[in-house]
Amino acid sequence: MVLQRYFRGDRCTFVRPMRVVRDDQDGLLLWLTAGSEFAALVDADGRTSHDLPLDELNEPRLTRQRWRDYDVLEWMPAGAAYSIWWMFADAFAGWYVNLESPYERHPEGVDSVDLVLDIRVEPGRAWNWKDEDEFAARTGRPGYFDAVEAEAIRAEGNRLAKLVEGGEFPFDGTHTDFRPDPGWGPLTLPTGWDREHRGQSAGPRRGE
Ligand code: MG
């Protein structure tokens, strides 16, 4: 099991436990069973980082939740600015392209920075951008990305969308028939999941 974390600046915004299917020169292949725990920032008014930029949230805290609806096979290619998620319900339900900074390893798992813009791809390879409005609103905000960096993020998305349209790897049928080991039940967040700041040591949360 590894702890997959997303950061914005020194602030952890999202964390979930993932099963390691493979860890080699191609990167990490991870599995998430629906019903597993994860945690994401929710503020005192119930808003999340989808609703407002991080600096406008009112005392956001990492809040435990349960992953719903889909099992996920996630490939994080080493050095790449994206991850590919194969979504499974009763059968393969499509891909999700999460644009993100290349992951960095830490003792319990991997850290990256979510780049807000995503792509949803149906099993028939029709695709659309997700969170374009949020991406536009975050561009130029403190702690996010400037217009030039936003261009590069979108360009990487466009490059991947071309692979989708061409039915090229990794959208060529690879892993769409993946079946998990029947023993891979939902995971719970392990001790130490709740470090909200980069470099914070394990132990009680601040203020507790
Ligand atoms: Mg994303």
Image (cartoon, rainbow, N blue to C red):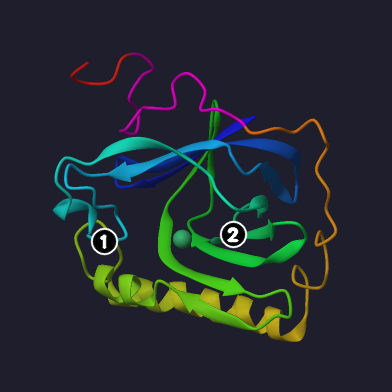
Residue at 78% x, 77% y: name it.
Answer: 168
Residue at 34% x, 36% y: name it.
Answer: 63
Residue 182 is inside the magenta segment: no
Q: Amino acid at mark 2?
A: Ala
- State whether residue 188 is above or below residue 55: above
Read off the magenta span. 187-203
Q: Quadrant of residue 33?
A: top right
Q: Main secondary structure of the magenta part?
A: loop
Residue at 75% x, 85% y: name it.
Answer: 166
Q: Position of residue 101 (x, y in %)?
A: 48, 56
- State whether residue 167 is above or below residue 71: below
Q: Is residue 65 left or right of residue 17?
A: left
For residue 80, which numbered disc appears in the image?
Answer: 2
Q: Which residue is mark 1?
A: 51
Who is closer to the viewer here, 193 or 39? 39
Q: Amino acid at mark 1?
A: Asp
